[in-house]
Amino acid sequence: MTRRRSSPLRTGPRVRGGRGGRGRAAGRLRRGILALLLLGLAATLAAVLAPTATLRPLKRWWAEHQGLVRVEGHSEILLAAARESRVDPYLLAGVMMVESRGHVDARSAAGALGLFQLMPPTAGEQAALLGLSAPSERELCSDGRLNARLGARYLAWLLGRFQGDVERALVAYNAGPGRLKRWTEQAGSYAAWRDARERAGDSEVLAYARDVQRYRDRFAERGVIAPTAALDPPRSASSDAPPGPRRSSAPAPPDPGGPSPGVPGDPVGPPVQEPVHQ
């Protein structure tokens, strides 16, 4: 009988064939790809399902950026209005930013129209003082140059009325000079009314004035609209007479009426404001 020879004892690790190693590598690759896909899906779901507060700052920044660029796109219009009215073009840009975000066809629910959100009676009065016919609503929402010209003319008149006090002129632009006069008389003085509203912390018209001045400074820092040297000297703060071709003996225009809120639905538009131009 032939004795079967026994196999030698294996002492080292068993080395598997190449096919098994390639299979494990492919499996690891598939698992890695799947993990990346799941991670991407989770990130997408997190962005979609994230609370509104998480995305709001980004939306506000983007909407504000678009507004700044849009207003700067009206540089030529702003410069022409500034030269005629002798009002700081950056202040005009600030008003345009808060009122309409640079939308030529802006129309509020209360009937304020165009770049400077003018009520038709106000626009008609300012047009008459410039020797123009009263503009139609269509013209106020399509002719940005005319709207800016009339808005600048009205703001210049308010600056003259309030001896160059920018904040008071802006409050009057937003709330109406007649309404501001009543508030001031009830409080005893503008300073007393202002202090009371600041303590209460609920004045939307003061917030409006602050926003306009903040954007005025922002536009000046960006330096896109115009170099200062290109402008005529600004109106004197002590001048009581409004600019333009109006005769010195002509009576001051009556206080127009109506609101001037921002553009409805604008995510970073001005706060809800009290009725203006009354």
Image (cartoon, rainbow, N blue to C red):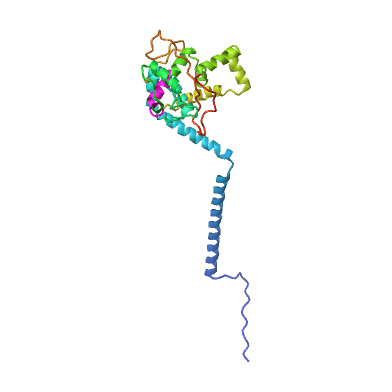
185 sits left or right of 161 in the view: right
Q: Nearer the viewer, residue 35 or 239?
A: 239
**Residue 46, percent across and down?**
57, 46
Which quarter of the image is occupied by the N terminus? bottom right
Taking the spot 49% from the left edge, 32% from the top edge, the residue there is: 64
Q: Nearer the viewer, residue 33 or 248?
A: 248
254 sits left or right of 15 in the view: left
Tell me where residue 105 sits by quadrant. top left
Q: Is residue 147 above or below residue 239?
A: below
Q: Is residue 115 highlighted in magenta?
A: no
Q: Is residue 148 highlighted in magenta?
A: yes
Name the outermost residue toward the bottom. 1
Residue 227 appears in the figure:
no
Residue 91 appears in the figure:
yes
Q: Which residues are magenta?
A: 139-153
**Residue 111, percent across and down?**
47, 27
Q: Nearer the viewer, residue 82 or 118?
A: 118
Main secondary structure type of the part rendered in magenta:
helix
Tell me where residue 219 sits by quadrant. top left
**Residue 117, percent across and down?**
46, 25
Q: Is residue 39 above or below residue 278?
A: below
29 sits left or right of 243 in the view: right
**Residue 176, percent across and down?**
51, 19
Taking the spot 52% from the left edge, 37% from the top edge, the residue there is: 59
How many numbered marks have been drawn onto this rendered protein structure?
Answer: 0
